[in-house]
């Protein structure tokens, strides 16, 4: 059984920063890609950032230059440093990972709320 547990959400003023973290635990043989998604009220879930092999990254255009994704393969963790936050970044943020146990499976975290408001 694999679990993804997120932490670090909260309320922040526009222009502020937050750091989200996600830890994967369980019978993990390998992790291919770790991602952060977000879902705002009334909107579809969207990919924010992804990291593969601990090095190859890609970002949603609207967060480039403000958000940084990083991972620690030894600890099976992924983080999202969010700077210059805007009200439109308000959403529930979900960690996602493609993990090898007995086969490759996609797992989701429970989500953490990020609210950007003055």
Image (tube, rainbow, N blue to C red):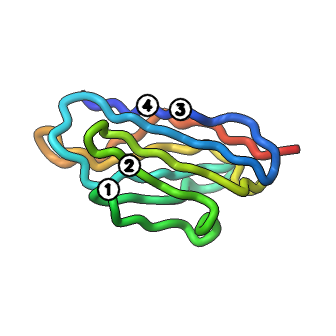
Q: Earlier in the sequence, mark 2 or mark 4?
A: 4
* CB-based contact (under 8 Å), mark 4 and mark 3: yes
Tell me the crowding category of disc 2: few under 14, some 14 to 19, or many 20 or more residues within 10 angstroms, Cα based. Answer: many
Distance from label 4 to label 3 (Cα)? Answer: 7 Å
Describe the element under mark 3 as helix, strand or loop.
strand
Give how far across and how far down residue 72 sits, in percent.
34, 45
Distance from label 3 to label 1 (Cα)? Answer: 20 Å
Q: Earlier in the sequence, mark 3 or mark 1?
A: 3
Residue denoted by label 1? 54
Describe the element under mark 2 as helix, strand or loop.
strand
Q: Earlier in the sequence, mark 4 or mark 1?
A: 4
Give how far across and how far down residue 81 sits, in percent.
57, 50
Residue denoted by label 3? 7
Q: Quadrant of residue 50?
A: bottom left
Distance from label 2 to label 4 (Cα)? Answer: 14 Å
- Report the disc number at residue 71: 2
* CB-based contact (under 8 Å), mark 1 and mark 2: yes
Distance from label 2 to label 3 (Cα)? Answer: 15 Å
Distance from label 4 to label 1 (Cα)? Answer: 19 Å
Describe the element under mark 1 as helix, strand or loop.
loop
Position of residue 83 relative to residue 26, above or below, is: below
């Amino acid at each position: 059984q694999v679990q993804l547990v997120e932490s670090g959400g909260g309320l922040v003023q526009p222009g502020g920063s937050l750091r989200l973290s996600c830890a994967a635990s369980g019978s993990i043989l390998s992790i291919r890609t770790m991602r952060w998604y977000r879902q705002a009220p009334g909107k579809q879930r969207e990919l924010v950032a992804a990291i593969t092999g601990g090095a190859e990254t890609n970002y949603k255009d609207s967060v480039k230059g403000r958000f940084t994704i990083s991972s620690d393969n030894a600890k099976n963790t992924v983080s999202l440093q969010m700077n210059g936050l805007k009200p439109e970044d308000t959403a529930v943020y979900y960690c996602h990972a493609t993990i090898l146990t007995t086969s490759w499976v996609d797992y989701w975290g429970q989500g953490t709320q990020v609210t950007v408001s003055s």
